[in-house]
Amino acid sequence: MKNLLPLVIAVGAFTLTPNAARALNLTHLYAEAVVHDMRYAESGASYREAHTLIPAARSAFLPHVSANANTAYNILHSTILGGTTGFTFPSGRFAFNSNGYGISVTEALLNVQALYNYRAAGQSLKASRIRYRLSASRLVLSVAQRYFDLLLAKSELRLRRAEEHALRAQLARAKRSFRLGTATVIDAKDARARYEAVRAQALDAANAVRIARSRIEQMTGARARHVWPLALSKLPPPPRRGSVLLEESRASRHNLVLLATRAEARAARARASAAAAGRYPTITAEAAYTYNRAGNSQFGFGSVIREKSIGLDLSLPIYQGGELSAASARAEARAYKAHVAVLRTEREVEFDVRQAFLDERNGYAEVRALRVAEKAAHVALQSDRLGLKVGVRNDVEVLRAQQDYYQARRDFARAVFAYLLSRLSLKAAVSELTVGDIRQLNALLRPPSGSLTRLSHVGSRG
């Protein structure tokens, strides 16, 4: 997640501006999402947790040092009965202190199970690192998806309001014609029904805008009331050259989901080997030193004992009630499950790459076609407006032309959004999606009128 400092600086300066002048773009929202998105934060926490696996597994090969100390006040009542040896042991009550301390060092010389556990920890850490990178890539895609959903919802709302405006004029015209006797009551009621239907659609579109805005705010923690619209005056960049086989080859080598699944499968295989190695012997070197002092005893005299020891310990499990066999079988089943997950992921990645590749190509062709349709609708609207001035068109016809233009513009914007998201999806499939793609998409936006423009390209530097 490098090159995020310019984004954070941009957001920090942006928050100091008045609310009326604020308008967020993709760069601002992505920088906020990096800080506030809970799924991304959870992935980072999992990655930090995985960092503890290696030290824990490595500890099995390092010396283990332990120390102990003790002290006690002893009260001993001793009565010696009999005695035929000629040596008389004292009897009575003895009160004395005893204390001691010790230190021991152990180190594994042979532990095959710990070796496989260490390999499994390394693969688990690698998988967690890849998952963290994957969450960063998915954050880019998710921010772009939610941003475009908001823009599309606003475009849909403009269309529905244009339809509502046009049908309101038609309803007023139908009422006027009914009063003049040139239209029937059926015509007036039909105009009323169409107006109420599109009015409900406009209300639904307004709610869709609120929901899309709330989704952005949920991810970023930032108010998204004003956002930069997409500049629809020119076509987006075309797809990059290449073939679907080339993209599949890239995904096979670099897809993060596939790489993480493979690392997890290797970790499961190492854990299965560790479970099977539970039957192997372990050899441990041990060294110890102890000191014990007693002020008295039942024999009437104290003692000071110092003991030093060094040696080897061999441990060989012979029969554990079937526990080792059950653990090995369970680990083997999990390793096979992880292997099947790799095969399934390979097929899914191959399908996702092909789908994104075809969606990108088809999407660009649709963008070009709808761009022509949008231009034609714009020309028709200009013609009807001119006809209204010279008296050959009425206001209802102009409103219908305006409605057609908004619909064509909405369809063109929807195609552009779908095409741009398919480009991101293809890059995500081959794991080439980075924060740089956010800056490239941000360059396709334009600041709304009356908003600040001095921060529009801050995030693109560095």
Image (tube, rainbow, N blue to C red):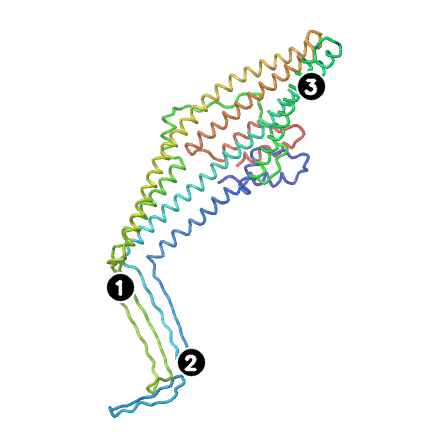
SS at mark 1 in the image:
strand
The residue indicated by pointer 3 is 168
**Position of 456 compared to 95: left or right?**
right
Residue 41 can be seen in this image: yes
Vertical arrangement, residue 318 with respect to residue 349, above or below? below
Residue pointed to by mark 2: 73
Q: Which amino acid does the dot numbered 3 rest on?
A: Arg
Disc 3 versus disc 2: distance between alpha carbons? 100 Å
Which image quadrant is residue 460 in? top right
Could you tell which of marks 2 and 1 lies nearer the N-terminus?
A: 2
The Cα atoms of the two marked residues, 3 and 1, are separated by 93 Å
* Residue 66, placed above or below residue 29: below
The residue to which callout 1 is attached is 313
- Give how far across and how far down residue 83 sits, in percent: 27, 90
Q: Could you tell me if the residues under marks 3 and 1 are in contact, i.e. CB atoms within 8 Å?
A: no
Is residue 47 toward the left or the right of residue 149 in the image? left
* SS at mark 2 in the image: strand
Is residue 28 in view from this perspective?
A: no
Q: Position of residue 65 (x, y in %)?
A: 36, 64
Mark 1 burial class by Cα count in 10 Å: few <14, some 14-19, many 20+: few
